[in-house]
Image (spheres, rainbow, N blue to C red):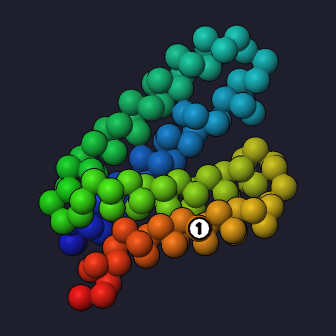
Amino acid sequence: MPPIAITVVLLCLSNIFMTFAWYGHLKSLSTKPWIVAALLSWGIALFEYLLQVPANRIGYQVASAAQLKIIQECITLFIFVPFAVFYLKEPFRWDYVWAGLCILGAVFFIFRQQLMS
């Protein structure tokens, strides 16, 4: 599997953990003190880092740090929108689509030199 594909898969998996660490407590631990949510989130975030760090090390062999960051932001939105709609039960908003299109613009500009050559 190419390094960029491994990177994307690992970043997707790490982002699932990150999303639950950052936002999952809003639904599942809303009645608990914030310190409980913070400690549990740190535990979840450990798994996120165990995937994210190797993903970026592998990806940095074939992509710049800026490219890795933009890939991560795309993945974040791709993971967060279904999480917000299906897990947090927030209504879908067209703003998610417009934000996604803006991020796709960022993808174009950060990869423009490779796309044009």
Which image quadrant is residue 7 in? bottom left
Q: Up-down: is 31 above or below 99? A: above
Residue drawn 47% across the image and 23% down it: 42
Q: With 71 as the anchor, is 61 left or right in this view? A: left
On the image, numbered disc 1 is attached to which residue? 102
Question: Where's residue 43, x and y in %?
Answer: 46, 24
Question: Where's residue 117, x and y in %?
Answer: 24, 88
Q: Amino acid at mark 1?
A: Cys
Question: Where's residue 68, x and y in %?
Answer: 33, 57
Q: Quadrant of the N terminus?
A: bottom left
Question: Where's residue 96, x and y in %?
Answer: 70, 62
- Residue 23 in view, yes or no: yes
Residue drawn 33% across the image and 61% down it: 67
- Residue 12 in view, yes or no: no
Residue drawn 66% across the image and 29% down it: 25
Q: With 117 as the anchor, is 87 left or right in this view? A: right
